[in-house]
Image (cartoon, rainbow, N blue to C red):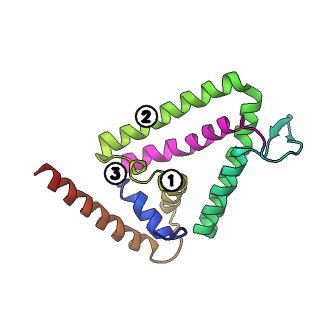
Amino acid sequence: MGLFDLEKHFAFYGAYHSNPVNIFIHMLFVWPIVFTALMLLYFTPALVKSAPIELWDHSLLVWNFGFLFTVIYGLFYVLLDKKAGSLAALMCFGCWILSSSVSYRLGYSVAWKVAAAAQLFCWTGQFIGHGVFEKRAPALLDNLTQAFLMAPFFVLLEALAFVGYEPYPGFNVSVKAKIDAERKAWQEKKQKKTT
């Protein structure tokens, strides 16, 4: 799988998310998982020795692992698709800024409890989506890194598809064919195991 092959990434992730209810559940819960993960990463040590940036109400932006992951995710999404990737990168940086502000205001003792509760709620919702509606294990059980990298971008592209966005002409048709082929292979494998 090419690192920046959007069709292959999207088809891999899409093969695990074909049920509309499961997709909707992911649309609700994936970005809050990103946000609350960044809340926790706010408390990691700075990677670069520099003065933190003070914004509006003196909330601090620290060049730490939260910032590093934000940059990696943002760049990855832009390299996958310039238009939707730029929007995803802006959303990542918005999450980083806002999560840093929230974590700074709440302090470590409260922020980690809020983030942990939100993570538990959102992950539970997604596992219910897979178990009850999709009837297939999540993608992260087959490819953890790919699933974590693609989840936020996948749900954004799903939302943009509702308003007619397509990264390039023919993308949706090509990806649907790949998803259908992957799901067919999975169903056949599943049937062989049960017989």
Task: Say whether marks 2 and 3 touch (CB < 8 Å).
Answer: no
Q: Residues within 10 Å of mark 1 (few under 14, many from 20)?
A: few
User: For residue 124, which numbered disc appears in the image?
Assistant: 2
Q: What residue span does the magenta drawing correspond to?
A: 19-46
As drawn, is 135 to the left or to the right of 96?
A: left
Give whichever of discs 3 and 1 has the lower sequence position: 3
The residue tagged with tag 2: helix, strand or loop? helix
* Residue with the mark numbered 1: 145
Q: Please, is residue 28 above or below residue 142 in the view?
A: above
- Front: mark 3 or 1: 1
* Residue at 31%, 40% in the rendered image: 131
Q: Name the kind of residue labelled 1 in the image.
A: Thr
> As drawn, which residue projects farthest toward the bottom?
169
* Residue with the mark numbered 3: 19
Spatial CA span between label 3 and label 1: 22 Å
Residue 51 placement: quadrant: top right
Q: Residues within 10 Å of mark 2 (few under 14, many from 20)?
A: few
Q: Position of residue 26 (x, y in %)?
A: 46, 46
Residue 97 placement: quadrant: top right
Q: Please, is residue 31 above or below residue 76 in the view?
A: above
Q: Position of residue 15 (x, y in %)?
A: 36, 58
Spatial CA span between label 1 and label 2: 19 Å
Q: Residues within 10 Å of mark 3 (few under 14, many from 20)?
A: some
Q: Name the kind of residue labelled 2 in the image.
A: Thr
Spatial CA span between label 2 and label 3: 17 Å
The residue tagged with tag 3: helix, strand or loop? loop
Task: Say whether marks 1 and 2 touch (CB < 8 Å).
Answer: no
